[in-house]
Structure formats: structure tokens, C-alpha cells
Image (cartoon, grey):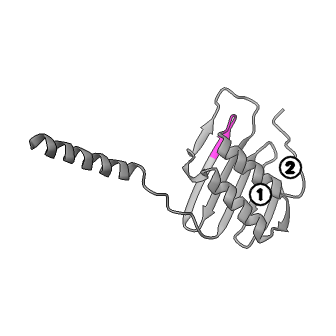
């Protein structure tokens, strides 16, 4: 009888612990805003405002375009699919001397997360970075620090 109670209590404990570890993810909903900072010798940024306006800034020069709701939703889906909100805040290769860092700050509804990457970046970060840059109609030129 004692053995049966012990086994039953153990099973209940395992189920409770598993429930805490594998809790369902709350869906991320709400308006999307994004800021990509490119830490180049001539600093650049791409900022997506909640109304779908995408603003490119390079030094003192600024230009903007309007994105369709489909383009904004596509970006939002890439962000969610690549688990951007679970990435660490910083990925940095201190041995790299000639790279260009990127900081992506994303807000969806009440959730906000920033990630800085210099050097080799995780795939999820690179996928989101590529999608953000692809929304700009012109190729973004990098100057480097040479």
C-alpha cells in the first residue's frame, strides 16, 4: 500500500513538473513596430512604424516607403516562426575585428525584445534581419571600417 501511494505521488509530481516545463506558449498579438540599427562606419537604420511606414536613415539622409498589410504580416510571421523573442540579448564574437553589428528591436503589442549581434548570428536572428532588409526597395550599402 505504501509503495502504491509513493508511486502515485511520484507520478503526480512528474505530471505537475512536466506541466510547468511544457506550458503552452501564449500567442503574440498586436501591432508590430521594428527598429534595425546597422552599426556601420556610417550608421544606418530601418524603422517600421505601426502604421506600416518603413523609414531608412543613413547619416543625415532619410527616406521612407509604405508597406502593405501583407508585407507587415509576413514580417510578423517570420519573427514568430524564428522565435525572435526567445533569443539572447547579445551575440558577440570578440575576436572579430572587422565586422558590422546589428541591433534589432521588435515590439508586438505589449511584448518588446532587443537583440544585438556582431559576428556569427543565430539562424533566427539572420532570418529576421534578412526579411527586414528585403522590405527596403534598394540594396543597403555597407561601408565598413577600413
Secondary structure at badge 1 equals: strand
Q: Position of residue 62 (x, y in %)?
A: 84, 62
Nearest the camera: 24 or 106?
24
Q: Residue sitting at 42 percent across and 55 percent down?
A: 23
Q: Is residue 136 left or right of residue 114?
A: right
The range drawn in magenta is 116-121
Nearest the camera: 106 or 14?
14
The C terminus sits in image quarter = top right
Mark 2 surroundings within 10 Å by alpha-carbon count, few (fewer than 14), some (14 through 19), many (20 or more)? some
Q: Residue furthest bottom?
A: 51
Labels 1 and 2: the sequence-earlier one: 1
Q: Position of residue 30 (x, y in %)?
A: 60, 70
Q: Residue sitting at 64 percent across and 50 percent down?
A: 82
Q: Position of residue 71 (x, y in %)?
A: 78, 64
Mark pair 1, 2: CA separation: 10 Å
Q: Residue sitting at 31 percent across and 50 percent down?
A: 15
Nearest the camera: 33 or 74?
74
- 24 in magenta: no
Q: Is residue 14 above or below residue 67?
A: above
Q: Residue furthest right?
A: 138
Residue 123 can be seen in this image:
yes
Nearest the camera: 142 or 110?
110
State if disc 2 and disc 1 touch (CB < 8 Å).
yes
The residue wearing badge 1 is 46
The N terminus sits in image quarter = top left
Q: Is residue 64 above or below residue 18?
A: below
Q: Is residue 83 left or right of residue 15?
A: right
- 119 in magenta: yes
Residue 58 can be seen in this image:
no
The residue wearing badge 2 is 140
Amino acid at each position: 500500500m505504501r509503495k502504491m501511494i509513493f508511486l502515485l505521488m511520484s507520478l503526480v509530481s512528474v505530471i505537475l513538473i512536466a506541466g510547468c516545463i511544457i506550458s503552452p506558449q501564449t500567442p503574440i498579438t498586436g501591432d508590430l513596430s521594428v527598429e534595425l540599427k546597422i552599426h556601420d562606419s556610417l550608421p544606418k537604420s530601418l524603422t517600421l512604424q505601426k502604421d506600416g511606414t518603413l523609414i531608412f536613415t543613413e547619416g543625415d539622409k532619410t527616406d521612407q516607403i509604405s508597406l502593405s498589410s501583407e508585407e507587415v504580416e509576413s514580417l510578423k510571421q517570420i519573427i514568430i516562426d524564428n522565435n525572435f523573442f526567445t533569443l539572447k540579448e547579445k551575440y558577440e564574437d570578440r575576436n572579430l575585428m572587422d565586422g558590422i553589428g546589428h541591433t534589432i528591436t521588435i515590439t508586438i503589442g505589449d511584448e518588446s525584445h532587443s537583440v544585438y549581434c556582431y559576428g556569427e548570428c543565430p539562424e533566427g536572428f539572420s532570418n529576421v534581419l534578412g526579411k527586414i532588409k528585403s522590405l527596403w526597395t534598394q540594396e543597403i550599402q555597407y561601408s565598413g571600417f577600413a
